[in-house]
Amino acid sequence: MKTCLALTLLGTALFSVPAAFGQGATSGIVGFSSLSCPAGTTLVVPTLVNSNVFQGAASVSSDGLTITPTTTAGWTVGAYNATSFTAPTTNYPKFYAEIVSGANEGLIFDIASNSATALTMASAITPSGIRGTTVQIAIRQHVTLDKIVQGATGLTAFVDAVNLFEPNGSTSTRIFDGASWVAGDYTTPAGHSIVYPGTGFSFSAAAPVAFNFMGEVKPTKTKVPMFQSGVNIVGNLNPASATSIYGSTFNSALSPYADGFNAFSSDGNMTTLGTYFSDGAQMLDGAYNPLPLTATDSIPLNRGVVVSVTADAVVTFNSPLAP
Amino acid sequence: MKPRSIALFVAFLACVASPVSAAVTVGHIENVSVGQFLSSSGSALTAGGVSIGIFTDGLGAPITVADSAFNTVTAFADLIALGFKDIRSLSGATAAAGTDWAFPLAVSGSYNSIAISALPAATQLYLLAFNAGSYVAGTPASSFASATEWAVVKDTTSHKSPSDLGTASLLLNTVVPGDILKGTDNGNNVNMTALGAVPEPSRALLGMIGLVALFVRRRR
């Protein structure tokens, strides 16, 4: 089944995102990106993010656990807190802070909680060189499975499911329950499961499904961590076009000849379309030969590839607004 | 509907959207930077090729084979008898265009679409090389016929089958001396050793044979 895509970009003058929380929110280019998934299994990487709710300069504590805006934010206490469900429901951070400029642009850090004036991070910020410095940050709400199904059609309750591949190598199955998602026990709420920027999931559908991802075109770089022990579904946050594998930033992110990724078909059958490696400077095909300039190999829109790395690594994608 | 009935019902429905069989990729490349197999004298190989595989039981399930088992191997057929399966014979294995694992260099390429059921994640992969012959898909026991040298690498850290949907690229520059079951370490490279070499008798045994022969001669 052919994929039918549509992207509508709405002008910032008409559809600027209002400052919904505190002060310092900025507007961006918002819209939606449609993705048709046939019956079967395909890989999905949403290409839009939630608009930021705060942006400004902030100092990072020396222990990396606190971020404090240099200008008093006056936040609502707890506005950025992680979820607080009782067991066995898994809790997730709801917001993240992203560095939006400089050498570390694109790094994101989960927020555990906030006071009126500071953020408490879910874990100490790394690399440690950022600690004790002042950076420009933006706060965004995570994209969740509930966000992803907003406006989706064709989903079949208690049949359609996603697999989220965790950094530690485990797999979390989430099943659509008609309105939200539940865990593999078909009971525990899981609609708040996070899909980090530049990452995705495998989606299995009994019948064709149309997603309508809504959000903002990410204006900053995206740094996507890839884990040695995990199954890394990675894609570029460009909601307007496919990403050419030739010349992609994977060429410097992958360990030469050792790391690689598989591209799979989008027809529901997960047929391997190609395997790719890097020699440290250029992308190689499955025979370890350099891809030519004319190569048409690409990562389709709102899709991803499965990356295997021999050690934890990071791939950086430029914003489509600043290629 | 009772809760247990609901659970059974939805479990049945779940089968409708169960994901298709997953697949993995295994690749190998040799060059001066990532290492290569060389002859026992350290020369570039002009014939033969590489085999990457696992050991399985009669039903295809991975098994563990003692390293000492390689001491009795004199031909590829012996490996087959031990349960060795070249990944090219596993379900779904498809060569990427341009893949060539035969000497002389370039040796490079990968096999994708290998069913995860045939190559479960974290299965130990063995990297072998022979100085003559080639892999014969139809009759693997006849592969690498006339080879006189070989090498066997068992990298327990870096040469494991990948996770679901993943890739594993087997390189020689990750190999440490302890990983080389047959052959010798040569920097990033691995030198082959004689295939099926018969262990030389000890001096004591030779001496005893000589004494027995002398005794028999004197009695005559």
Image: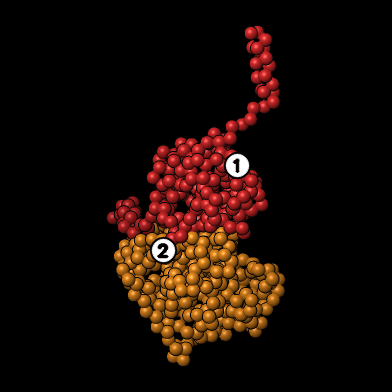
Chain colours: A orange, B red
For discs 2 and 1, the disc positioned in front in the rendered view = 1
User: How many C-alpha atoms fall within 10 Å of the one at disc 1: few (<14), some, or many (≥20)?
Assistant: many
In the image, residue B79 above or below residue A174: above
Chain under disc 2: A
Q: Residue at x 51, y 61 (%)?
A: A288
Q: Residue furthest left?
A: B1
Name the residue at 59% across, 79% down. A100
> Residue A183: x percent and y percent?
43, 59
Q: Pick whichever, A256 or A311, lies toward us.
A: A256
Horizontally, residue A156 falls left or right of residue A114, namely left
The residue singled out by tag 1 in the image is B193
Q: Position of residue B52 (x, y in %)?
A: 50, 48
Q: Chain of mark 1?
A: B
Whether residue B128 can be seen here: no
Percent position (x, y) of residue A247? Answer: 52, 73
Dividing the picture into quarters, in which one does residue B58 lie? top left
As drawn, A111 above or below B150: below
Q: Residue at x 59, y 39 (%)?
A: B194
Q: Residues within 10 Å of mark 2 (few under 14, many from 20)?
A: some
Q: Quadrant of residue A129?
A: bottom right
Which residue corresponds to mark 2? Answer: A273
Tell me the SS state at disc 1.
strand
Task: Place residue B34 in its image quadrant.
Answer: bottom right
Q: Which mark is residue A38?
A: none
